[in-house]
Amino acid sequence: MKRLACLFCASTAALAAHAEFDASRLWVNAGFYSAHFDTHKGLRNANPGFGLEYRIDPMWSATAGRFRNSNNADSSYVGVYVQPWTYAGVKLGAVAGAFNGYPNAYNGDWFPAIIPTATLESSHWGLNVALVPPLKDRLYGAVSFQLKYRFRTD
């Protein structure tokens, strides 16, 4: 977990070197819920965990976390959301980053990913919806939902 915290801090610092930390931009989440395309494979849909997301500006966010993945193994992630478009109040773009912990993908080691994502945010609550594409026999495709909360708004 210390390594994950360091990765999150480093990615946030790199993207926000020009800005001072603002607690109202910090979101916390409790993992994901994944609706898998391959429903017959006995995959875990509830993916509890803990994650952080820091909104750098309206287009960019840094994110990191840890969760129980669909293969019932622990995974970590670190990445950046790039959402240059907005339609009807929904931010559209992708999250680019790295994941680990999937036994069929690179023996559980870290691997890069770019995942299309839509985000809806209110003053305290937010929802990230990601379209996770299948990757041969390594990863199973899903639509993943990540509910997030921020304690402070300014």
Image (spheres, grey):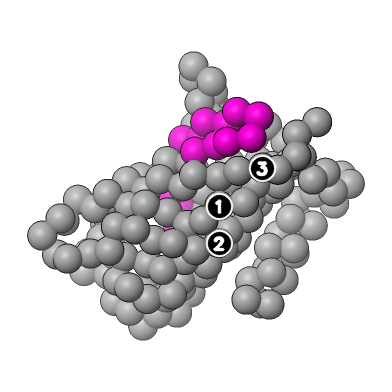
Tell me the amino acid under the disc marked 3. Arg
Query: Residue extending furthest bottom?
Result: 107
Hey, which residue is sitting farthest left in the picture?
Answer: 40
- 128 or 150: nearer the eye? 150
First in sequence: mark 3 vs mark 2: 2
Between marks 2 and 1, how big is the CA–CA gap?
6 Å
Q: Nearer the viewer, residue 154 or 62?
A: 154
Mark 1 and mark 3: span between their CA atoms?
9 Å
- Looking at the image, residue 115 sits to the left or right of residue 95; the answer is left
CB of mark 2 within 8 Å of CB of mark 1? Answer: yes
Label 1, residues with CA under 10 Å away: few <14, some 14-19, many ≥20: many
Q: Secondary structure at mark 3?
A: loop
Q: Earlier in the sequence, mark 1 or mark 3?
A: 1
Q: Name the amino acid type tagged 1.
A: Asn
Which of pointers 2 and 1 lies earlier in the amino acid sequence?
Answer: 1
**What range is drawn magenta here?**
112-127
Q: Which residue is mark 3?
A: 150
Q: Which mark is residue 29?
A: 1
Q: Position of residue 116 (x, y in %)?
A: 42, 43
In what element is the residue under mark 1? strand
Q: Amino acid at mark 2?
A: Phe
Residue 50: numbered disc:
2
Q: Is 44 within the magenta?
A: no
How crowded pointer 3 is (Cα within 10 Å; few <14, some 14-19, many 20+) is rated as many
